[in-house]
Image (cartoon, rainbow, N blue to C red):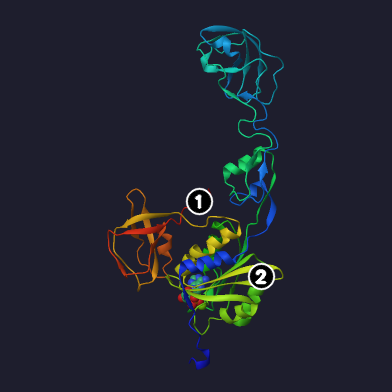
């Protein structure tokens, strides 16, 4: 029986937008760290980078062919004396004069005197006297020194998200290490007496832990590093110990125990360890959410207490934790791309709350349909989905044919 003293005050009801704004304002941007270039993909550059030299560093051929003087090949056919050969990685041992040609490979330095490359296809490919068979415009097929990057020029600004192209730019100016915002290390806990890990037998009344695996993977997909911790039983002592260890991380994500059930202990324990707000977010799935921070000296460690239901946990991660982890990495834009789509079936919400239905968006047709049953414990509804259908506060039935907003959860946030 529940005693009168265990009655809990109703948590503050908050819109998802307000909750996200408060979370983004509350999370710290992580420190900048020197990182090996290949580990920096997806991270945010924390320094301005200038070119240490011209790229390419020397004038070179864009084709396999013959380095010549343009005046000699203005009309064809014409015969030129072959005075040598230069391959990529070599350097020409002489100039090219009037009536002369030097065989040259793609990427090889241009010999002085030459200003044009005739493609090997426009010649008879001979080695003593070559016949140029096609008139070739002066200056063609040459890559100038510095045509990509000029020495001293700023090529990337602090704040840039590093994609494959930027990693390549940094390599081309010799940066083996770069200063980037740290990848957050995120402690991931599951809570609940009924939760059992994958290697243990399942007894009566128990269920497999899926949330830690879901959430650790979602952490990784957000560019952060999951630190998978234990399953924590529904006991204040166990929670206290577990969260005390979790403080070594850059952020903590838990699932379960944030409701107002008799065994939901997260609230009192978190109140001891730091400053935490318990919110009832006006959305479905995923009403209860705890957000706050634990303190470890000067370090502020954001903590997200997500609901235990599998869909609620992943939807609230998507709506609140992923943007927070991106912001901690220094990302300016943390919003997924959205689209408009026409419903091919009616949707019944529970009440008037904003509802995130799991959908299959067809970009060709501009339509969206549901993934089937939408219960907050039906994880398959997320597995089948390629979007969330964002149905605003309002009528509980949305008719077939109505235009709705979809959040493209398979697409990364735009970085430029
Ligand atoms: P709670 O938020 O703790 O009240 O849990 C709500 C529901 O989610 C319950 O049915 C739990 O059994 C289920 N649940 C909680 N944690 C997990 C988990 N780690 N994996 C799968 N289901 C869970
Ligand atoms: Mg529980």
Q: Is residue 205 above or below residue 386?
A: below
Which residue carries the number 2 mark? 247
Label 2 vs label 1, nearer the camera: 1
Of residues 132 and 226, which is closer to you in this image?
Answer: 132
| Residue furthest to the left | 400
Question: Is mark 2 in CB contact (under 8 Å) with mark 1?
Answer: no
Q: How far across and how far down the image is residue 406, in percent? A: 39, 58
Of residues 239 and 41, which is closer to you in this image?
Answer: 41
Left or right placement of residue 387 versus residue 254 in this view: left
**Residue displayed at 68% across by 26% down:** 89
Q: Note whether residue 402 is visible.
A: yes
Callout 2: helix, strand or loop? loop
Callout 1: helix, strand or loop? loop
**Displayed quadrant of residue 387:** bottom left
Q: Mark 2 to mark 1: distance in Å?
A: 31 Å
Which residue carries the number 1 mark? 414
Query: Label 2 crowding class (10 Å Cα cut-off): few <14, some 14-19, many 20+?
Result: many
Left or right placement of residue 321 versus residue 403 in this view: right
**Residue displayed at 69% across by 37% down:** 152
The mark total stands at 2
**Residue displayed at 69% across by 34% down:** 53
Decide which of tag 2 and tag 1 comes sooner along the chain: 2
Q: How far across and how far down the image is residue 382, in percent? A: 43, 62
**Displayed quadrant of residue 377:** bottom left
């Amino acid at each position: 029986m529940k005693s009168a003293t265990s009655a809990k005050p109703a948590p503050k009801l908050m819109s998802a937008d307000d909750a996200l704004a408060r979370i983004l304002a509350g999370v710290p941007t992580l420190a900048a760290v020197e990182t090996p270039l290949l580990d920096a993909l997806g991270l945010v550059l924390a320094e301005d980078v200038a070119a240490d030299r011209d790229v390419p560093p020397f004038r070179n051929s864009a084709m396999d062919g013959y380095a010549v003087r343009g005046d000699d090949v203005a009309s064809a056919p014409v015969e030129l004396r072959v005075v040598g050969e230069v391959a990529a990685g070599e350097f020409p041992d002489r100039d090219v004069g009037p009536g002369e040609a030097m065989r040259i490979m793609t990427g090889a330095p241009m010999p002085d005197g030459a200003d044009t490359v005739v493609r090997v296809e426009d010649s008879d490919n001979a080695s003593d006297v070559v016949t140029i068979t096609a008139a070739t415009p002066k200056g063609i097929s040459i890559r100038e020194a510095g045509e990509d990057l000029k020495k001293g020029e700023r090529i990337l600004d602090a704040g840039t998200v590093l994609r494959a192209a930027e990693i390549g730019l940094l390599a081309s100016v010799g940066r083996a290490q770069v200063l980037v915002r740290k990848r957050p290390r995120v402690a991931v806990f599951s809570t609940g007496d009924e939760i059992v890990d994958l290697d243990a037998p399942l007894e009566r009344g128990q269920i497999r832990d899926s949330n830690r695996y879901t959430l650790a993977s979602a952490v990784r997909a957000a560019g952060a590093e999951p630190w998978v911790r234990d399953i924590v039983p529904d006991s204040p002592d166990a929670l206290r110990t577990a969260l005390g260890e979790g403080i070594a991380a850059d952020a903590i994500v838990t699932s379960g125990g944030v409701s107002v059930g008799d065994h939901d202990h997260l609230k009192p324990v978190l109140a001891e360890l730091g400053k935490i707000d318990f919110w009832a977010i006006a959305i479905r799935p995923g009403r209860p959410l705890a957000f706050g921070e634990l303190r470890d000296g000067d370090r502020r460690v954001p903590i997200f207490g997500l609901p235990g239901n599998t869909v609620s946990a992943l939807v609230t991660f998507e709506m609140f934790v992923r943007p927070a982890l991106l912001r901690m990495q220094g990302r300016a834009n943390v919003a997924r791309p959205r689209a408009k789509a026409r419903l091919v079936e009616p949707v019944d919400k529970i009440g008037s709350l904003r509802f995130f239905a799991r959908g299959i968006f067809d970009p060709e047709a501009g339509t969206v349909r549901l993934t089937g049953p939408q219960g907050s414990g039906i994880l398959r509804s997320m597995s089948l989905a390629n979007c969330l259908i964002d149905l605003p506060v309002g009528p509980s039935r949305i008719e077939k044919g109505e235009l709705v907003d979809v959040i493209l959860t398979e697409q990364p946030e735009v970085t430029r």
